[in-house]
Image (tube, rainbow, N blue to C red):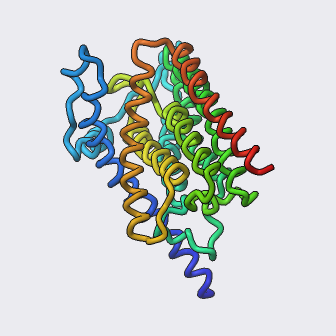
């Protein structure tokens, strides 16, 4: 086997399994869930503060193994016999729900990533966005096949994806336009702003993404024990990590030194993790799905559009 092929395989294995992929995602999810549990009481309404208590650092791991040891029943057809294809589809879809965020993390050009060098074509913006959309789409398909009330929630999941996608794409387009690189490689979007216009666009785009990206998460989860498994649980956590790291990479300017850049990304991703969870929960609280979606569009879409206008004006 040629040396460059071996080097490529090693780089991909390190990126997917260790950093910035699976191991990084697991550790960040554990820390992010703990931080979310610690900050949640500060933003919860007074009526719900008694229920908003910090969780144990390893609680997500306990939940994962508890779900892994449980076999969820397959939904019944009107005749009373469960179809064999549903558990198989749910198993494959749940695995893909966990795998897609890991691949998205591996492709992000985070500081020190094995795939962030010029030798590898990692960090394509469209590929990363497509991988981030896999988990919401598969979650919707699982619910659409489950029957009953879950079908309605599956349709709502697709609507939530579209609600967050429009302002997110507009904000990302503004960042690409103001960078002047005319490239969809994420590496060209991580450099520190050099002009006031770039600073303004990054602030506006970061604010719009922080409001839009929570809608790619599962805002109203099923009760424990209903249509849930270990793969879906891991997919939710890793999806939140991938979205948080994606936001930190686009919104935060990275220092030139590797150590400081790593601290900025890790710290920013942790704060973004907690913020995405809190924003998604607060906006969905005591609101109908349609009203919450209108609120997101009324806040995120104008900010993203303003960022794009400033970016387009600066390029003239």
Vertical side of 1 occupied by 113: above or below: above
Question: What residue appears at the point 58 percent right and 76 percent down from the top-left corner?
Answer: 8
Q: Is residue 160 visible?
A: yes
Question: What residue appears at the point 64 percent right and 61 percent down from the top-left corner?
Answer: 188
> Disc count in the image?
0
On screen, residue 31 versus residue 238, left or right, reads left
Vertical side of 201 occupied by 102: above or below: below
Residue 5 place in picture, x, y as percent: 61, 80
Q: 290 and 99: which one is in front?
A: 290
Residue 74 place in picture, x, y as percent: 44, 27
Q: Quadrant of the N terminus?
A: bottom right
On screen, residue 316 versus residue 304, left or right, reads right
Residue 276 place in picture, x, y as percent: 43, 36
State the image quarter where residue 89 is shown.
top right
Question: What residue appears at the point 69 percent right and 51 percent down from the top-left corner?
Answer: 178
Q: Among all residues in the image, which is located at the extreme front? A: 196
On screen, residue 44 versus residue 141, left or right, reads left
Vertical side of 76 occupied by 261: above or below: below
Residue 256 place in picture, x, y as percent: 49, 69
Q: 173 and 144: which one is in front?
A: 173
Question: What residue appears at the point 46 percent right and 30 percent down from the top-left corner?
Answer: 218
Q: Among all residues in the image, which is located at the extreme right? A: 316
Q: Is residue 86 visible?
A: no
């Amino acid at each position: 086997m040629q040396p460059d092929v071996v080097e490529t395989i090693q780089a991909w294995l390190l990126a997917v399994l260790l950093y910035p992929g699976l191991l990084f995602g697991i550790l960040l999810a554990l820390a992010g869930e703990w931080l979310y549990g610690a900050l949640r009481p500060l933003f919860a309404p007074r009526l719900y503060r008694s229920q908003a208590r910090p969780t144990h650092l390893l609680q997500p791991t306990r939940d994962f193994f508890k779900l892994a040891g449980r076999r969820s029943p397959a939904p019944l057809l009107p005749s009373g016999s469960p179809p064999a294809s549903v558990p198989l589809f749910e198993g494959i879809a749940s695995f893909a729900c966990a795998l897609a965020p890991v691949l998205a993390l591996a492709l992000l050009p985070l500081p020190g990533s094995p795939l962030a060098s010029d030798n590898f074509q990692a960090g394509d913006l469209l590929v990363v966005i497509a991988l981030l959309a896999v988990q919401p789409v598969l979650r919707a398909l699982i619910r659409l096949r489950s029957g009953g009330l879950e079908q309605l929630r599956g349709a709502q999941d697709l609507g939530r994806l579209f609600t967050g996608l429009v302002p997110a794409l507009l904000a990302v387009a503004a960042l690409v336009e103001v960078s002047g690189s005319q490239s969809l490689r994420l590496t060209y979007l991580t450099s520190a702003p050099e002009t006031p216009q770039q600073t303004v666009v990054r602030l506006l785009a970061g604010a719009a993404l922080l409001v839009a990206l929570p809608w790619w998460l599962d805002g109203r989860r099923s009760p424990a024990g209903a249509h849930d498994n270990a793969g879906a649980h891991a997919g939710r956590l890793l999806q939140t990590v991938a979205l948080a790291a994606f936001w930190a990479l686009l919104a935060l300017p990275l220092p030139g030194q590797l150590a400081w850049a790593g601290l900025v990304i890790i710290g920013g991703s942790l704060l973004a993790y907690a913020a995405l969870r809190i924003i998604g929960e607060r906006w969905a609280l005591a609101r109908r799905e349609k009203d919450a979606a209108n609120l997101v569009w009324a806040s995120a879409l104008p900010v993203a559009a303003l960022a794009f206008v400033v970016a387009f004006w600066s390029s003239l």
